[in-house]
Amino acid sequence: MPSLPLPPPARPQSSGSPRSTATTLAALLDEVRHSASARRHGVGFVDAREEPGFVSWRDLVCDAAAVALRLRPLVASAAAGGRGDDTLPQRVAVVCPTGADFFRALFGCWLAGLAPAPLPPPQRFAPRDAYVERTSRALDACGAALVLCTARHEDLLVAAARRSGESASRVLRLDQLSVPALQGAPSPVADAAGEGAGSAPLSESVALIQFSSGTTGEAKPIALSHRALLAQAELLSSCWPDGAQARQSGVSWLPLYHDMGLIGCVLPALLRCADLTLLRPETFVARPATWLRTVSDRRATVSPAPDFAYRHCVRKVRDAELEGVDLSCWRTALDGSETIAPTTLRAFSERFSRWGLRPAALTPAYGLAEAALAVTLSDLDAPARTVHFDRAALERGVVRSLPAAQTAETTQRQSGSADSVELVSLGRPLAGFELRIVAAADSSGRMPPTDAPTDEVGRVWIRGPSLLSGILRRRGDSWSLDPATRDGWLDTGDRGLLWSGELFLLGRDRDLVIVRGRSWPAQWLEQMLAGEEALEEAAVAASSATWRPGGEGAGDDGEGYVLLAETRVAEEQRAGLVRRLRGLLLAGAGAAPRAVVLVRPGSLPRTSSGKLRRTEAASRWREGRLPILYEAVRETPGRAPHPAPDQGSGGGHDG
Amino acid sequence: MHRGHDPGGAQGADAAVLEEIRDLAALGDVLADSPVAASELRAEHRLVEDLELDSIALITLAVEIENHFRIAFSEDDDASLRTVGDLARRVVALRQGRDGGG
């Protein structure tokens, strides 16, 4: 099966030898502990009042070694449950807010030969019942033998562990594990890392359970090996400036239970013994200017974030908050992990160029937890690139670019036009990665899949050095890994195209709406409604997600789509709003939705990071589990009519 | 953990804190998507049900209040504070605990 020939990477990405020869994270931690720079460099923590704290990498590793010594006997006794797989160590859930304890827990697991599974701590003022329920499901999904947490969340996690089927999950507080008495013990790291053959972690054994974001379903426990994590850390290390005089300084506010925060920021910094300054995610959300000020204060060279963060800054940061800020040090502002809007790139670059932001700083990338993060990266030394494609052709799956002169003038607010679609280049594959665009008809399990013609849109398949070992799954009493790749290839489920060797994405394949041979990513249809002021948020879902086709080629074809819209408009204005929405879609796409459903703001399901879960929203509606304000359904194959949908606009919902 | 204190004085303190919370909410755009304007904010308003604060607005409000009053809500506070009045009363209690040198 020949893979699509791609031009070589745009630049040498791993010039010379790797930064470390360690084959496990425990070995890397041991190297770090003995490195001279690990005493001077480490992790800084900036609290909401921007008062800094600092712990050196060496101290973090020493603290972690003490944790590891305490963990091993506890886990050994909990290991009664069967172990179906030699490469699958016991799992330990790590639930710590951004702070030194997170590192003590994470590194402690690695030194003890365990597989940490970082999980989110509860959000401020959010309902605790839902948190306990979600966390108990995650403990079940990864079969955690232990839960490590801080004192603040102990009660909640005890409740979650009790509710989970994992009756063996013991909840331990970090402050009970890190015993200072061990400080004087002889080389605890070497003891922990150089454990006898039985429990020595091999490079192929599972080093991390990373939960996927869960945009298109329940979050999946993705198992990543030491080899995959170290390979990814080396690749991401290419984003950091090199050379003897180069400053090594990163800043991140990303949650540490997130792949971009953990693998994307912590691992390359650890590999380089670089300074990494961390803010709590809530500090960024409340005051995004704190992020920019910290980048400036620390003269940081690297700080990644997803697209919404750059939009959040444009919207919320006030000029007065940036007095004295100089962003010229910021070499790489990776933008990844969700759909990147050309308008965001332009708005952020233009707004913050006054504070020295370099035009080349924003660096779009493509990554996913299944690849331990990054797969493609755009040119570090050039501004982000966008390309205009022929909209009508693209709706038929054909790639045809339009010369820049022929495209409508683009502004900060607008992207594309009636005839064109502007997409952001996500760059070329990182060293060792290969990409294929697989024909749509071959994505459904038939083997071997065939490549789409070079000028067609298809499903993105990848192969490379940091792919997952599998998806963690329980079978009876034993745990194993479901392989997620075929012949080394992973079907990402993303829809995309290659143009001059660079990747452009069109959203999740599952979110694709098809009507009479034309197709639209759900986001395009949602964007057509941007001018409607009464609309708070819109989710478009393909009918295939709502109406199950009776069988291939028979009966309903699953074509078409439904619109689920959040709004605050008064009851008497709802019918009018539905008419306007339908009109906008008809004008923009030439195909009206099968159903328009109005719901209260906040009713549509979202992931923990706030992304819409379109398919889940549609199935909740179909099953009558979405509290609706108003609906206008034109065709209802396979779905019973919804009686008396209007629940009024009063405030007394969910009792 | 409440020490005995003059109820009239406490109410006065609550009202003063409520006024400051109004200013913080306005400053942090917490109520940008809310049906209630900052100037109309009352003690009995429920954060989620009445003010319709989403997770971002809740986080912002929590961080702004903690910064401004130099206090930290506990996990129990996070789980139990439901109304604007709850917030104001808790801020007063936490400040007394801190300033009282307890």
Image: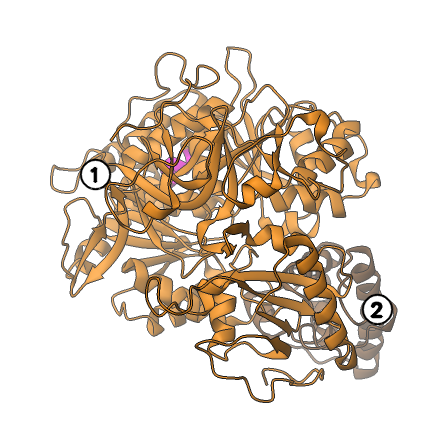
In-front residue for pair A395/A512: A395
Image location of residue B76, percent across then percent down: 56, 70
Location of mark 1 (residue):
A201
Quick check: A5 left or right of A96? left
Q: Secondary structure beneath disc 2?
A: loop
Q: Chain of mark 2?
A: B
Image location of residue A193, percent across then percent down: 24, 35
In the rendered image, the residue lying farthest to the right is B39
Quick check: A363 left or right of A190? right
The span picked out in magenta is A59-63
Q: Which chain is orange?
A: A
Asked if the magenta segment contains residue A48, the reply would be no
Question: What secondary structure characterizes most of the magenta part?
Answer: helix
In the rendered image, the residue lying farthest to the bottom is A644
Q: Amino acid at mark 1?
A: Pro
Foreground disc of the pair 2, 1: 2
Image location of residue A549, percent across then percent down: 38, 67
Above or below, comparing residue A493 to residue A613 in the picture? above
Badge 2 crowding class, 10 Å Cα cut-off, few under 14, some 14 to 19, many 20 or more, is some
- Disc ID at residue B37: 2
Q: Determine the CA span between mark 2 and mark 1.
A: 57 Å
- Residue B92: in sight, yes or no? no
In-front residue for pair A171/A339: A339
Quick check: A418 left or right of B23? left
Q: Residue at x 76, y 28 (%)?
A: A353
Q: Secondary structure beneath disc 1?
A: loop
Q: Quadrant of residue A592?
A: bottom right
Q: Amino acid at mark 2?
A: Ala
Q: Residue at x 62, y 77 (%)?
A: A631
Badge 1 crowding class, 10 Å Cα cut-off, few under 14, some 14 to 19, many 20 or more, is many
Q: Residue at x 53, y 32 (%)?
A: A426
Q: Colour of chain B?
A: brown
